[in-house]
Amino acid sequence: MTDTLYILDNTFADPAHGGKVFYCEHCIIMEGLLAAYPQLAEKLTVRRIDWPRPRKEIVELLGEENQNLPVLVLAEGGFINTKDDILKALSERHGIPLPHP
């Protein structure tokens, strides 16, 4: 079993903002990390989720109150859902460099 990183699809339209097209700043950082360290994608399961809520897959795993992405679901149970803590965990658990403070 492996850790699973859930991120939003790269682009999405948000009806609450007139249908303008956006990306998630924190999820795009995770995409950049996966591109910079391709070995990371071999150690993780990466799931890209559509923007609209409810995000059924996430709700089933973590509950309705924990739909924010990105989220790292740990193989042994539990999850991390803040950008900085995810970056630190990916470094510690999967051997990529640490982010500079």
Image (cartoon, rainbow, N blue to C red):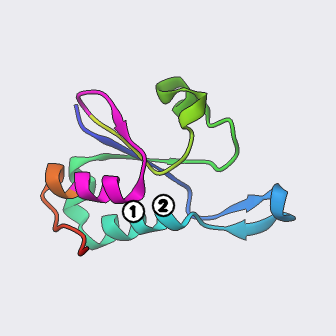
User: What is the three-letter code of the residue carrying label 2?
Assistant: Cys
Q: How crowded is mark 2: few (under 14 residues within 10 Å), some or many (20 or more)?
A: many
Q: Could you tell me which secondary element the residue under label 2 belongs to?
A: helix
Q: Is 51 left, or right, of 39 in this rendering?
A: right
Report the front residue among 10 and 85: 85
Judged from this view, the residue extending furthest toward the front is: 101
Q: In the rendered image, which quarter contains the C terminus? A: bottom left
Contact between marks 1 and 2 (CB within 8 A): the answer is yes
What are the residue bounds of the magenta stretch?
A: 75-90
User: Does the stretch in magenta take in 86?
Assistant: yes
Report the front residue among 50 and 27: 27
Residue at coordinates 28% horizontally, 55% vertically from top-left? Answer: 41
Q: Could you tell me which secondary element the residue under label 1 belongs to?
A: helix
The residue that disc 1 covers is 30
Judged from this view, the residue extending furthest toward the left is: 95
Q: Which mark is residue 27?
A: 2
Percent x, y for residue 86?
33, 53
Percent x, y for residue 38?
25, 65
